[in-house]
Image (spheres, rainbow, N blue to C red):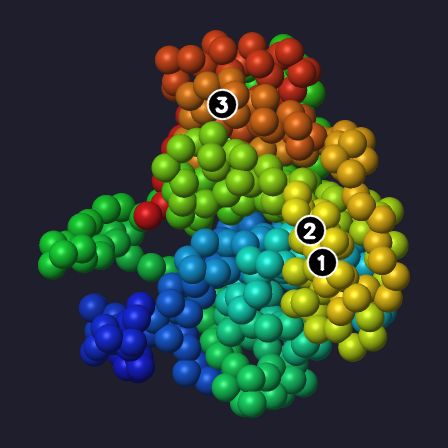
Amino acid sequence: MNELELKYGCNPNQKPSRIFMENGKDLPITVLNGKPGYINFMDAFNGWQLVKELKKATGLPAATSFKHVSPAGAAVGLPLTDTLKKIYWVDDLGELSPLACAYARARGADRMSSYGDFVALSDKCDVDTAKMLQREVSDGIIAPGYDDEALEILKSKKKGNYAVIQIDENYIPEQIERKQVFGITFEQGRNELKIDDEFFGNIVTDNKDLPDSAKIDLAIAMITLKYTQSNSVAYACGGQAIGIGAGQQSRIHCTRLAGTKADNWWLRQSPQVLGLQFVDGIRRPDRDNAIDNYIGEDYMDVLAEGAWQNIFKVKPEVFTKEEKRAWLDKLTDVSLGSDAFFPFGDNIERAHRSGVKYVAEPGGSIRDDNVIETCNKYGMVMAFTGIRLFHH
């Protein structure tokens, strides 16, 4: 089959809609369940490329959580600490497979943004991952295969309408890619850039100590950015993206947005948040929203209005700015990637506030000296990759 008709395009008024192969070859995918739409397939194909490259770069199973053609999270299958299991709401699932750990990390980085995600897995979907997905609000999944029991679990989601796509992992696309805008065809060579250890070899700071763990995190950040709508910046730590700033016109706004998400990820691990006592039967999304509100700037208003009684068994103490800052100062060894050069040192100043120690960016700004000097001020390690990673 080289064509699949879709219900509509990006919006319900955009008809007709289809995906097809221009060269007459068969589509490299099989829809095993549901009826994925235009944006579902955009998320699926971008997500699949991301996890395939992550696995190739790290040798570990990988997962990503996509929303609106950008990743909300991406990770590799490193084991979860007890704290991470708790903040990702998987501490009741027992021992998890490496693939399930990868998805828990990808979903857990920014649970607000991952609500209603499209999932991509580098490996055959196993039962552990399917059980985790079963209780999350998600639109669909793409993977190179599915265990029989895992497939049945996924088919039961969304009243049987959960989108399940299987992709041929050996599929190789044409080297030239095309798309139309306003009836005009754009053509370019595919971005086949290989990101590996050598990608971070040009270290331009005084500190040149780049451990293997940081190389993995930098690879995660840069491969994630390769499939994130530009401008974009990604923070990574411990085998996963912890903050992604996508589609901003200003580089500093990318850095701030991603930094705030990284801060929230870390604040969720604080004793104040881990000690919250939720009312029985609260929905998972409501719990996520409550935590984001609790660590936000306006939580005093929520407490004053008495709304806490619908969420918590016990009225939480206010998480003060001073307490938050003290906890954030404990976040260290974070890696930061940027899809284009940093034009000013202010990006590094903001990154420092979120525990960044390792940086990768293309270089090439007329103010590179200022950016390097700012990194040196904080003892950071920065590599110039020489390659821009815009994605549109």
Answer yes or no: is residue 223 visible: no
What is the CA distance from the residue labelled 2 to the residue labelled 3? 45 Å
Q: Are marks 2 and 1 in contact (CB under 8 Å)?
A: yes
What is the CA distance from the residue labelled 1 to the residue labelled 3? 50 Å
Q: Which residue is mark 2?
A: 301
Residue 349 placement: quadrant: top right
- Mark 1 or mark 3: name the one nearer the start of the chain: 1
Quarter holding the N terminus is bottom left
The residue under the point 20% across, 68% down is: 22
Three-letter amino acid code of the residue under disc 1: Glu
Secondary structure, mark 1, is: helix
Query: In the visual, does 340 lie left or right of 322?
Result: left
The residue under the point 66% across, 47% down is: 298
Q: Residue furthest front?
A: 305
Place of residue 81 in the rendered image (x, y in percent of width and height, measured from the top left): 83, 52
Q: Are marks 2 and 3 in contact (CB under 8 Å)?
A: no
- Mark 2 or mark 3: name the one nearer the start of the chain: 2
Q: Which residue is mark 1?
A: 305
Residue 360 placement: quadrant: top right
In this view, 141 is above or below 350: below
Q: Are marks 1 and 3 in contact (CB under 8 Å)?
A: no
The residue under the point 81% across, 59% down is: 86
Residue 27 tag number: none
Three-letter amino acid code of the residue under disc 3: Phe
The residue under the point 21% across, 78% down is: 16
Q: Which residue is mark 3?
A: 384
In this view, 119 is above or below 349: below
Query: In the visual, does 222 lie left or right of 193?
Result: right
Number of on-image labels: 3
Place of residue 312 in the rendered image (x, y in percent of width and height, measured from the top left): 81, 64
Q: Callout 2: 10 Å neighbours few (<14), some, many (20+)? A: few
